[in-house]
Each structure stands twice: as structure tokens, then as C-alpha cells.
Image (cartoon, rainbow, N blue to C red):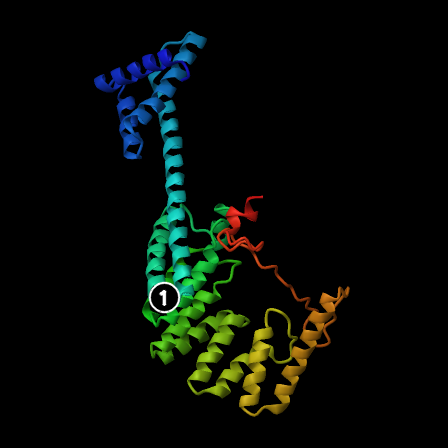
Amino acid sequence: MANLRLKKSILEVVDNQLKANDPPCTKNTYDKLLDAGYSKSEAKDKIGAVVLTEIYDILKKGQAFDEEKYKSSLEEMLRQSIDYEDDHHIRTEWDKWDELVQKGYESFEEQKAAEGLCFWQEAWDIFESVMKQVPETETLYGLMESQDYVYPIDCWLQDYEMELGNAGKYGERIAFCQKILEMFDWQGEDDSCFRCGIGESLFREGKTAEAYEYYENWLMDDSQNVNGTNSFSWILFENGDAEKAYEVVRKVTWGVSCYVDNSILFMRARQLADYVGKENESKWYQQQLDTFENSIKKWEMDEDEIFDEFTAPKQIPVVKEKKIYPNDPCPCGSGKKYKKCCGKQ
């Protein structure tokens, strides 16, 4: 309402409607706007904009005042206004979350783990609060995309899980990982980090049989899961069962090719084969690792094709460029965050 005299007249109409509670939809809308956090003047301005539109329609079309149409217009304005405030609230909460996350990282860099976990516990409380406002379960990367990848949510969740384990807070770590697994839709995305967090924590708490059962059930459903297999083999080995640790890894690596995703299991298998005295099998694993390393070198030399010499299909290693997040140090060396330096471009 650019014309001040017109604005004053319209606001008088709004005031009269509020005082007389006629029509009731005006007072109802006004109260809801106040509940949503708008000031009295802001609420009246918003209602006044609807009143002005209704007056223009009446004058233009020569029609009488239609209370139902006016009520419908107020409801639409209210819906849009509250949706905006909800989005604004979420963005504000994300900013608070980001600040606490960064403080936590700084504390861990300074070897102040307890302080870092305190910051991250506060960040986690905010994160849970924000996620409760998300209308439908979505994937982790869907959430990050909705925030334009401004926040390193995936990295932080994994780092928090790891630091809880480093601090020996195994019960909290299990609860955290279970919550994350429930919070997101993991179809097509990798949840093994959090599954491993549960299994490893059960083992650290002395619940060895429960940990074994947990891994066995998981790998029964997902037998080729690299992280799960590697994690299970580690706790078996630490519990003095090197033979079974080797069997678990050998089951998914023997007779297949070594490539990027499973190379860690081949290194693990070679080490375990040496440990349990399987010299010939250790040599075979080393051969696969050598072949994989050579294929990487050939790929880096722009070879057109890398042919696998063994039983699995040809595997071309994928080298992912390291993603730079907005809050990471800018790679130009300025000392500023990426989002405040080269990330602006």
C-alpha cells in the first residue's frame, strides 16, 4: 500500500472489523498471525492487503461484498504467511546448528574432545528438532539437496558417530545410530557407517554374542557389504578368532577381482591370510592388489580400456573429486571459509 492516506483508511477498516469482530474471519486470521510470530502492525498490514484487493474487485466488477470469498482470501494469505515463517524458522535453526558444528570441529582440532561433544550434543538437539518439521521421510542426500548443499550434514553425522565411539560413549553411539537409521530413507544410499557403529559399540560394551548376531543378520541380508564385512572381521580378530575373521572376508573376495570399492577387503584378506598361515592364498590376494594398482596407473595414463584378467566383469576405478563444502577452508589459501571466498563466485 504505497499511498499513505489509502493505507491509513484500509487499516481503519481492519481495526473496525477487529473491534466489532465482524466478520469473524478477520479476528481469527489476526490471532493466528500473532501466534505465528508476526507483530500486531505486521498482522494488520497483511489483512489490509487482502481488504484492499477485495475493494478493488468490488469496484472493478460492481459486485457486493462476498464474505465467503474474503474469508477464503484471508485463509490463503494466512497459509502462505505461516509457511514462510516456518521455512524462515528452519533456516534460522540450521544457522544455529552450523555454528555449533563448527565450534565442535574447532574443539576437536584443539584436542578438547569433551567440549567438542558438548557442542555437538546441542547441534544434535537442534537437528532432531528441525527434522521433526520435515513432513515426509526423505533420503540424507535429499535433505542436503533441499538445503542447496550449504551444510555438510553427511560428514558431520558420520564424524559425530565416530567421536562418540572414541569417547567410549557406546550406549549414546548406539542410540544415535539407531535414530539416524530410522530418520532417513536409506534406499539407494549407504547406511553402513551407522550400522557398523551399532555393531562395534555392542562389542565394546562386552556384548560379544549380541554383536556377532547383529553382524551375521546384517550380512545375511547384504552379503556383499564391504564396510559391514570389514568391521565384523575386525571385531572377530580382536576377540581372538582370526580364523573366522579370515573366513568372513574370504567369502566375499576369493575368486573375484579387486576394484575400488572392495580393495580394502583384499588388503584385509591378505593380512589375515598371512596371520593364519595361508601363504598361497596370501600371494593370490597380493597379485590381485598388484593388478588393481597397475590398472589405476594405466587409467591415470588415459588408457582407453582396463581389462580385468580374472573372473569378475571389467572394473574401472572411479576416482571422486573431493567435494568442497561451504564451511570448509577455501582451497585458494586465503584462510576464509569457502562460502565467503571463492564459493561466492
Residue 112 sits in quarter: bottom left
Picture coordinates of residue 256, whole percent (x, y): 64, 76
Q: In this view, does 268 lie to the left or right of 177?
A: right
Picture coordinates of residue 22, whole percent (x, y): 25, 17
Secondary structure of the residue carrying tag 1 is loop
Residue 48 sits in quarter: top left
Of the 4 image quadrants, the one containing the N terminus is: top left
Q: Which residue appears at 41% of the width and 73% of the height?
A: 199
Q: Nearer the viewer, residue 105 or 45?
A: 105
Q: In this view, does 167 lie to the left or right of 192?
A: left
Q: In this view, does 2 lie above or below 283?
A: above
Q: Which residue appears at 39% of the width and 67% of the height?
A: 111
Q: Nearer the viewer, residue 273 or 9?
A: 9
Residue at which label 1 appears: 112
Picture coordinates of residue 203, whole percent (x, y): 38, 77
Q: Nearer the viewer, residue 67 or 316?
A: 316
Residue 311 visible in the displayed image: no
Q: What residue type is labelled 1?
A: Lys
